[in-house]
Image: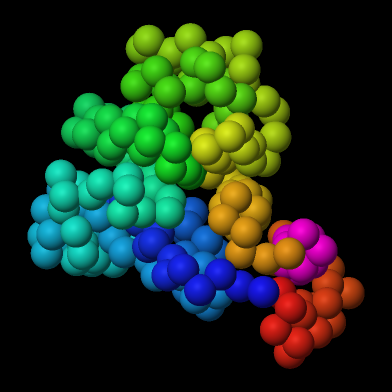
Amino acid sequence: MRSETPRKPVHLAVYDTYADWETGHTTAHLTQRGHTVRTVGFAAGAPVTTMGGVRIQPDLALAELRPEDSSLLILTGASLWDTSEELAPFAAKAREFLAAGVPVAAICGATAGLAREGLLDDRRHTSAASFYLAEQPGYGGAERYVEADAVTDGDLITAGPTEPVAFAREVFARLGVYKPDVLDAWYRLFHDSDASAYPVLMAASESGDA
């Protein structure tokens, strides 16, 4: 039986050069499962332009975001993670979230930002490649790097740029979006194109037992 406690929103960080494709599965299926997704930028209402040329108007300013008001912070990849320290305040916000026991999910270049913030030193994690993180100033987590599509260590989820579906799976698992067998079917369908998974998802949807 589902809890009657209202869910706190999931917060999606948005900034110029945000890699559109990396979080589409995550946010679409969270929304379909009744979660509210709110976008967070440097300033509320100040549009940003994604890598794909899509303009997004953030709902909330980063300075206003509090961990206690959120169920998860998603940090997307972006060219800016690799070309400047402009996005460092988002990594600092991730530190606040983790310190408060609120999950953070980072994909692609956002993992580099977390590496520079020192947030990967004591947690199992992955990224585009181990040498990519090794190049980040201050990174001390090489021994905890895992060669995997996506990794969850407590409240931290990480993934590389080619694994948006595995990234979504870890988010769903952390938030309890689907029951384990349904989540497995979801992953097999969207990652492996396994048609045998479709009836499992449909049966769960029709019964309300997802």
Q: Residue at x 11, y 53 (%)?
A: 43
Residue in the image at 32% along x and 45% along y: 67
Q: Above or below — where is 39 with respect to 134?
A: below
- Span highlighted in magenta in the image: 180-189
In the image, residue 107 lies at what x, y percent? Answer: 48, 42
Q: Name above or below for residue 67 compared with residue 151.
A: below
Please identify the quadrant where the N terminus is shown: bottom right
User: Which quarter of the figure has residue 79?
Assistant: top left
Q: Quadrant of the C terminus?
A: bottom right
Q: Is residue 204 left or right of residue 73?
A: right
Q: Is residue 192 left or right of residue 145?
A: right
> Quarter of the image holding residue 50?
bottom left
Q: Could you say where residue 95 lies in the image, as x and y percent from the top left? A: 35, 30
Q: Looking at this view, name the residue that lies furthest to the right.
A: 196
Q: Nearer the viewer, residue 77 or 72?
A: 72
Q: Main secondary structure of the magenta part?
A: helix
The image shows residue 197, relative to residue 132, as above or below, that is below
On the image, the x and y values in percent for residue 9 come to 37, 62
Using the image, determine if residue 132 lies above or below residue 1. above
Q: Position of residue 189 (x, y in %)?
A: 76, 68
Tell me which residue sits at (68%, 66%) in the image.
178
> Is residue 185 a member of the stretch shown in magenta?
yes
Residue 160 in sight in this render: no
Q: Front-most of 61 and 155?
A: 155
